[in-house]
Image (cartoon, rainbow, N blue to C red):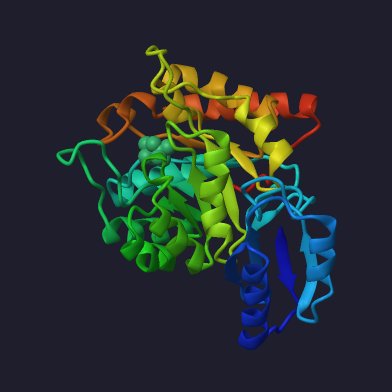
Amino acid sequence: MLIILKHGAGSAEIESVVREVERVGYRAHVSEGEHTTLIGAIGKGPTPELIEHFRALSAVQDVIPISKPYKLASLEVSPRPTVLRWNTGATGGGEVLIAAGPCGVESLEQTLTAARYVKKHGAQMLRGGAFKPRTSPYSFQGMGQEGLEILAQARRETGLPIVTEVVSPEQVDLVAAYADVLQIGARNAQNFALLQAAGRSGRAVMLKRGMSMTLEEFLMSAEYVLAQGNMKVILVERGIRTFEKSTRFTLDVSAVPVLKSWTHLPVWIDPSHAAGKRDWVTSLALAGLAAGADGLIVETHPEPEKAQSDAAQQLTEAQFADMMDKVRALLPALGRKLAMELEPA
Ligand code: PEP
Ligand code: MN
C-alpha cells in the first residue's frame, strides 16, 4: 500500500509512520518529494482493517492499496494521464509530439541543419546524443560537453527543447544543465543509480525500454525515477531482442496498449532503433501511433551515410518530410493531432 502523508509532515511524523509500518511487519520505503512524502509499505496485500488503521494516523493524508509491484507508476495511484509540457507542445494529453534529430551530435553544422529541417517539417523537440553509450569502446563516444553546447545553440536558434542522453550518474548535473529532457538509454534502463540521479535532477526523463526487459520490469525502472519525487517520465518502446534477425530489434507494438492500461505515464515509440534500417522506419512509426503512442522519437541526419553512429537507420531529410506527411494524414483517422505546428526558423 502507498501511504501519502499530509503536506508539510516533518521528520518526526515521517519517522513515526515508518515505525508503525515496520511494527505491523511491512518494509517502509520513504520518498520525500518537494511537497509530499510518500511511504510505500511493502509486504503482503494489506487487509481493509490495516488500511483504515493507517488512514486514522494524524500525519496521514490517504492510503492507497496497490496490488502491482510498481506503485507510483500505476493507474491506481494516478488515474489521470500525466501530461508533460514544453514551449512547443505537450505529451500525454492526446496530442502527438515528435522528437527528431541525429543519433549523435557530430558538428555544429550537422546539428543546426537537422534542427532547422525537423522544425520545418513539424517536429516539436530536437534529439541528439552528446554522450553515446556504444556497444564497442572503440566506436564514436560522442562529443561530450561540446555536443551539449551545440544542442543549446540549436535550441536558441529554433526554440526546440532538447532531449539528450545521460550515461552515468556523475554526469547528470552536467547534462541536466543543458537538456530539457534526460534520455536514459536501453543499455542503462536498469542502471538504478543513474535512474535515481536523473530522478533527483527534477528534469523530465525519457526512459527507453531495455532490450530484454519485460513491461513490468520497465515500469519498475520508471518507479526508481518516480520514487525521487519526479513524476516527469516518458516511457519509450524501442524494440526488444527476439529470435528475428531481419530487423535490428523487434518493435513490440503491443507494449503501447498494455502500458497505457497499466500506467498514467506517456508512452512513445522509437521506430529507428527497432527497424535498424531507414526504409522501414516510417511503417513502424505509423504502427506505433495507430496503437496509441503519445509521441515518436526518430533519428534523421542531413547526410545519413556519413553518420558516426547508427548510419543505416537515420532518415534523410526527404524521408523525414515524407514520414511527417504520412503522420499528418493518419492522425485525423485516429481523432488526434500534432502537438503544435511551428513556424519554420
Ligand atoms: C539512441 O537514442 O541513440 C540510443 C542509443 O537508443 P537506445 O538506448 O534505444 O539504443
Ligand atoms: Mn541511435
Residue 205 picture location, percent across and down: 52, 54
Visible in this render: residue 114?
Answer: yes
- Residue sitting at the far left: 138
Q: Nearer the viewer, residue 25 or 123?
A: 25
| Residue under the image location 64 percent in, 32 percent down | 256
Instruction: State the count of labels.
Output: 0
Residue 200 picture location, percent across and down: 49, 68
Q: Quadrant of residue 26?
A: bottom right
Residue 148 vertical placement versus 100 (above, below): below
Compared across the picture, whether 131 is left or right of 185 comes to left
Visible in this render: residue 345?
Answer: no
Residue 199 vertical placement versus 288 (above, below): below
Q: Quadrant of residue 101?
A: top left
Residue 44 picture location, percent across and down: 67, 51
Figure quadrant, ligand 2: top left
| Residue under the image location 45 percent in, 50 percent down | 183
Compared across the picture, whether 325 is left or right of 106 comes to right
Residue 112 picture location, percent across and down: 39, 49
| Residue under the image location 48 percent in, 48 percent down | 126
| Residue under the image location 84 percent in, 57 percent down | 48
Residue 167 vertical placement versus 5 (above, below): above
Q: Quadrant of the N terminus?
A: bottom right
